[in-house]
Image (cartoon, rainbow, N blue to C red):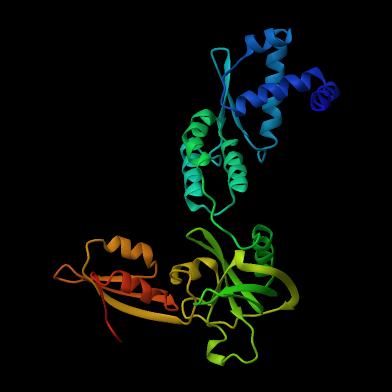
Amino acid sequence: MIQEENEKESKEKLSPKVMRMLDIYTELISGYIVKKDEIAKRYGKSIRTIERDIEDLEYYMENNSMMIGSGKIIRKNKQYNLEQKSNVLSNSEILAVCKILLDSRAFSKECMSKILHCFIDYCAEGKKQINELIRREEDFYVETYHEYEFMEKMWQIGEAIIHRKCIEVNYKRVTNNKESQVRKRKLKPIAILFWEYYFYLVAFREDKDMKEEDEYAPIVYRIDRIKNLKILEERFHIPDKVFEYDTHVNEGEFRKRVQFMRGGKLRRVKFLYYGNDIHGVCDRLPTAKVKPQENGTYIVEAEVFGDGIDMWIRMHEHDVKEIKK
């Protein structure tokens, strides 16, 4: 009852012309065809009045190109529809993103639902169809277990990465005997990556007892296992050519070289592949350089961090034989 009164009060504050234009705009961005005679009848106005409303709306949209739902109003046979600009996602693109999000299982059910419907609200048309296509999957969505809330921490980590600031964390480490230990770590955050349900932080650990050769071997931390996080005022610098592939550290280059979210020193591996899906190998190892052999096999060389590649080779032992350098 109170909500209805508030809505009524809000409408009374807007002029009739503004209310008409908002209704027209809402229908246009929702993908509906607007018929000026129906609008005129709905509001008890002349068709010329409605035409002026649409002309004013066109002028506003042309001068506010960054607004959501911006585009060009197309007139045909006394009807109007909105032709969306190319930077607006299509229905098929929105559906694909929603499916990827659901399959990622990266968020709580409540958070996932909010993100999905924010995307769907951008649909110029087809909103009903997309809702129907994802509804059942959304209803049966099973969220993954997260140790601690991680969304705000991930944002803080992002800020620290941009400004090259050290962070201090209390990290819940699970050992081989399944016992949990929370340890304090001072880190130099480098990248945020996503892999199989979880977000990870790639960082260098600052430890006075650490060997010099291990100082710039990246370590991977699951962000939801960070209990507490503090951004320090201390800034860090990564020396040029710490990594042979680039003088600048970036998430894209890390992602190419990290397998199974396992950190460690930069390595070069070489192996013989005699399976039937070399494209799958290149998908798994984006840094791979492939040399086809006459007998239908391939010699593959790649740069990777740590021992994740060893796990992959063991998993594909029937198709892969490592060549020791």
Instruction: Kindly tell me whether residue 289 is visible in this rendering.
Output: yes
Figure check: 217 above or below 211: above
For the point 59% across and 39% down, the residue is 117
Residue 82 lies, in percent from the top left, at 58, 27
User: Quadrant of the rendered structure where residue 314 is?
Assistant: bottom left
For the point 82% across and 22% down, the residue is 8
Given residues 281 and 117, the one toward you in this image is 117
Whether residue 1 sits left or right of residue 172 in the image: it is: right
Figure check: 163 above or below 9: below
Whether residue 260 sits left or right of residue 57 in the image: it is: left
Whether residue 116 sits left or right of residue 297 in the image: it is: right
Residue 242 lies, in percent from the top left, at 53, 83
Image quadrant where one finds the C terminus: bottom left
Figure check: 132 above or below 256: above
Residue 74 lies, in percent from the top left, at 57, 23
Instruction: Kindly tell me whether residue 165 is visible in this rendering.
Output: no
Q: Residue furthest left?
A: 295
Residue 294 lies, in percent from the top left, at 14, 71
For the point 58% across and 12% down, the residue is 78
Given residues 292 and 122, the one toward you in this image is 122
Image quadrant where one finds the N terminus: top right
Given residues 229 and 51, the one toward you in this image is 229
